[in-house]
Amino acid sequence: MKKKFSVLINKKINKFNKTIAAPSDKSLSIRVLLFASQCIGVSNIKNLLESEDVLNCVKALRTLGVKIIKGNGLYKIYGNGFNSFKTKKKTNIFVGNSGTTARLLMGLLSTHPGKFYLYGDASVNKRDMSRIIEPLEKIGAYFYPKGKKTLPLTIEGTNFPLAQTHIEHLGSAQVKSCILLAAQNIAGISTIKEKKISRNHSEILLKNISADIKVKKLKNINLITLRGQKNLHAFDYTVSSDPSSAAFLIALTLLTPESKLVIHNVLCNSTRTGFIKVLKEKMNANIKIKNLKKISGENVGSIIVSGSKLKSINLSGNIGALIDELPILFIISALTKGISKFNSIEELKNKESNRILESKKILTQAGIKCKITKNSMKIYGNDKIKTQNKSIVVKTVSDHRICMSSAIFSLATGIKVKIDNFETVNTSFPKFISLIRLLGGKIEIKKS
Ligand code: S3P
């Protein structure tokens, strides 16, 4: 992690009209690296996101003996086939702030004999790993210390992994992808009964590189089967822009009257566009997706958004398609007239911070009434918020999305904000400050 710094914002942004490029998608970037490491030959990856989370994944793979070279704007991953990591007696791996790297990588390590000690930053070290320990133990891996549910942990992979049937009931793409990465290295058919649908990038990528994967949509579940140990060949891949990063810029545009923003080549996979869908269909937002096309097997499009008079929202059901966008949706709702309700959001407590609590802290400081329970949130929105004599201090440790949501809140209202630990934004969106400045926003950086 680079040096700590805070940011100060105390001026509302003026209206803007711009076309910008959003950063590449984090989920896709981490997945292509991990899957390419298990293919035979050199995979060429264009537009890999160069954020701390992704670069920690690159480092972790290099520690495991995978050659990765950057040149001519491409990342070249030299894969040696399934189960091909070069293992020592004990390998130490730092995953930084990246829960995705930690959980997905453990899927791969579960089928490698050897001991791997995984550790991360303070935030990752608090996150629940029992959700992947349970399925990986079923496959045959061991975890030490016994009974510990958080990093640091040592995983000991097995020589004889067993194909199993897993039930995924959390709606977690990380758990599903962890199992799929393990399954690709296991002989026989592994099965996942996906009870709550989550982002499906791993399934799309596996299909695209000719893995033996089938996804059957049944009445209440997706039945995913994967016959492992098929040799997969290296591939070329272009990573499109991250809808979860674009969401902050979309929010700022919606909340700034007479503004317009165009963002090309944004990943528009329906398991990721819940935020846009809700804004358009339920909140009256002026937002369109155009030029839909396929890039590396994924739906990609241009997003055109304009400042809008929004309506409050009552959200319930599966939140999988907008899980990472909820903090910024809370901010939008807080600045929209009416009471907004969010149900079944308990998974937000398990992110880089407890996002229900941290969002409430921001809104309450701004004088927005907000009630929370362990799985819901009610926001009493105000589209004419008074800014005088108000200021907010955000001290969340290591949560990039809380930091960026607070920044957007301040830019949209003019309420003064000081956000500590803003360096954590580099985990997903290193160009956030420069992009905000490009739109005309004023952000001051203070060394902490
Ligand atoms: C991710 C899945 C989601 C999401 C995270 C990235 C992924 O987490 O919140 O930012 O790349 O698979 P869960 O799977 O824990 O819901």
Image (cartoon, rainbow, N blue to C red):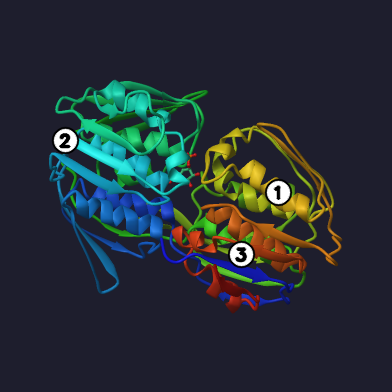
Task: Determine whether the residue tagged by mark 1 lies in a helix, strand or loop.
Answer: helix
Looking at the rendered image, the quarter that the N terminus falls into is bottom left
Q: Name the quadrant containing residue 186.
A: top left
Choose mark 3 or mark 1, whichever is in front: 1
* CB of mark 1 near ligand 1 (< 8 Å): no
Task: Determine whether the residue tagged by mark 3 lies in a helix, strand or loop.
Answer: helix
Residue placed most toward the observer, 408 or 166: 408
For the point 49% across and 37% down, the residue is 198
Image position of 86 (left or right of 385): left
Image position of 30 (left or right of 335): left
The residue to which callout 2 is attached is: 114
Q: Which mark is residue 249?
A: 3
Distance from disc 3 to disc 2, alpha carbons, whole Å, reads 44 Å
Q: Going from the N terminus, do you reach mark 2 or mark 1 first? A: 2
Image location of residue 125, percent across then percent down:
42, 42
Residue placed most toward the observer, 402 or 50: 402
Q: Dot 1, crowdedness within 10 Å: few (<14), some or many (≥20)?
A: some
The residue to which callout 1 is attached is: 361
Q: Going from the N terminus, do you reach mark 3 or mark 2 first? A: 2
Distance from disc 3 to disc 1, alpha carbons, whole Å, reads 22 Å
Image location of residue 266, percent across then percent down:
50, 60
Image location of residue 166, percent across then percent down:
37, 23
Q: Dot 3, crowdedness within 10 Å: few (<14), some or many (≥20)?
A: many
Residue 445 makes an appearance in the image: yes
Image location of residue 43, percent across then percent down:
22, 57
Q: Which amino acid is tagged 3?
A: Leu
